[in-house]
Image (cartoon, helix red, strand yellow):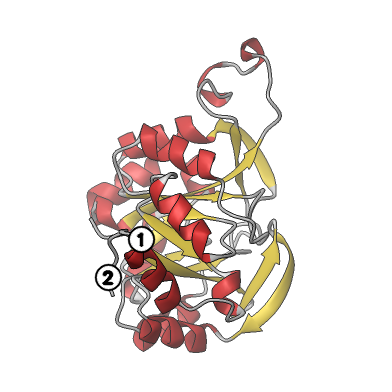
């Protein structure tokens, strides 16, 4: 199966922004311009995340999503502020191929199964914002909400709110509920450009049978190779290094292909 390279547009107030560990956001441009460039460069898909919608308890910026969808020909996922089946329908009608849910999946898990039943599992991506926790003695973990297998806690509301959920156990549950794909982001690695959290990605990939998109920490070519091989990810998502022109998608794919990783060139 071909491995995918996916740029991510974090959107705030209609503009692309990027921070470090979910804070210190900087404006890096217009979403439509970025989308066109990434499509032309050979991106396999594009992810658009309205990163403050859930925290601000408002809907996704459908107009911005629609403009991006009209500008590109590659598959397009939209997340942020999706809380109900009607929100999913509105985002898909705006031109998205998939939706990504995080906060709503935790607060109302039935949206996963109901969404998969109504729109198809292939449309439902569950994003898991995970932060490595200090190791605790097993007796203090407390069942499925504590973490028998992993040591990462799930956060919601754009990384602001800890849930007590263990990331690996949560990944298993959302697969059972009908999610078609997972998007785990390491909050510890996000924006640092020091590499993906290989352990987190591998732990989730080994626990489920649906595709896993690694996110958080890409900074150089080797990081993509590591997470797609050792980390067992099906796709690698990145933002900063593409936004700031440190690497192009073509460079990443050529590097991977030269090392035997199957990609679409």
Which quarter of the rendering shows the C terminus? Answer: bottom left
The spot of residue 226 in percent (x, y) is 47, 51
Q: Which one is in front, 221 or 176?
A: 221
Q: Residue at x 47, y 33 (%)?
A: 168
Q: Which one is in front, 182 or 85?
A: 182
- Residue 109 visible in the displayed image: no
Q: Residue at x 32, y 66 (%)?
A: 257
Labels 1, 2: front one: 1
Q: Quadrant of residue 58?
A: bottom right
The spot of residue 35 in percent (x, y) is 45, 82
Residue 213 versus residue 59 in the image, above or below: above
From the viewer's perspective, is 111 left or right of 184?
left
Badges 1 and 2: C-beta atoms under 8 Å apart? no
Packing grade of label 2 (10 A; few <14, some 14-19, many >=20) is some
The spot of residue 78 in percent (x, y) is 43, 66
Residue topped by disc 1: 259
Which quarter of the rendering shows the N terminus? Answer: bottom left
Badge 1 element: loop
Residue 90 versus residue 147 in the image, above or below: below
From the viewer's perspective, is 161 left or right of 152?
right
Residue 216 versus residue 199 in the image, above or below: below
Q: Quadrant of residue 213?
A: bottom left
From the viewer's perspective, is 66 left or right of 131?
left
Packing grade of label 1 (10 A; few <14, some 14-19, many >=20) is few
Q: How many marks?
A: 2
- Residue 265 visible in the displayed image: yes
N-terminal of the pair, mark 1 or mark 2, is 1
From the viewer's perspective, is 71 left or right of 134?
left
Q: Which one is in front, 108 or 255?
A: 255
Residue topped by disc 2: 264
């Amino acid at each position: 199966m071909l491995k995918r390279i996916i740029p991510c547009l974090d959107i705030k107030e209609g503009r692309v922004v990027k921070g470090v560990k979910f804070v210190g956001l900087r404006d890096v441009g217009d979403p439509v311009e970025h989308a066109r460039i990434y499509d032309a460069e050979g991106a396999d898909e594009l992810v658009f995340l309205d990163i403050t919608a859930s925290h601000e308890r408002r809907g996704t910026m459908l107009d911005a999503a629609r403009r991006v969808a009209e500008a590109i020909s590659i598959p397009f996922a939209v997340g942020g502020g999706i809380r109900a089946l009607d929100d999913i329908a509105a985002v898909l009608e705006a031109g998205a191929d998939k939706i990504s849910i995080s906060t709503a999946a935790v607060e109302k898990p039935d949206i996963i199964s109901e969404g998969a039943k109504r729109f198809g599992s292939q449309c439902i991506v569950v994003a898991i914002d995970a932060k490595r926790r200090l190791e605790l003695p097993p007796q203090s973990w407390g069942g499925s909400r504590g973490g028998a297998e992993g040591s990462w806690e799930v956060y919601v509301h754009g990384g602001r709110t800890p849930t007590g959920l263990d990331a690996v156990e949560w990944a298993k549950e959302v697969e059972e509920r009908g999610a078609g794909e997972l998007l785990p982001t390491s909050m510890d690695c996000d924006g640092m450009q020091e590499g993906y959290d290989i352990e987190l990605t591998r732990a989730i990939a080994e626990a489920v049978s649906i595709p896993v998109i690694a996110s958080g920490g890409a900074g150089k070519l080797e990081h993509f190779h590591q997470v797609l091989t050792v980390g067992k990810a099906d796709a690698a998502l990145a933002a900063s290094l593409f936004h700031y022109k440190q690497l192009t998608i073509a460079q990443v794919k050529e590097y991977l292909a030269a090392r035997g990783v199957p990609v679409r060139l």
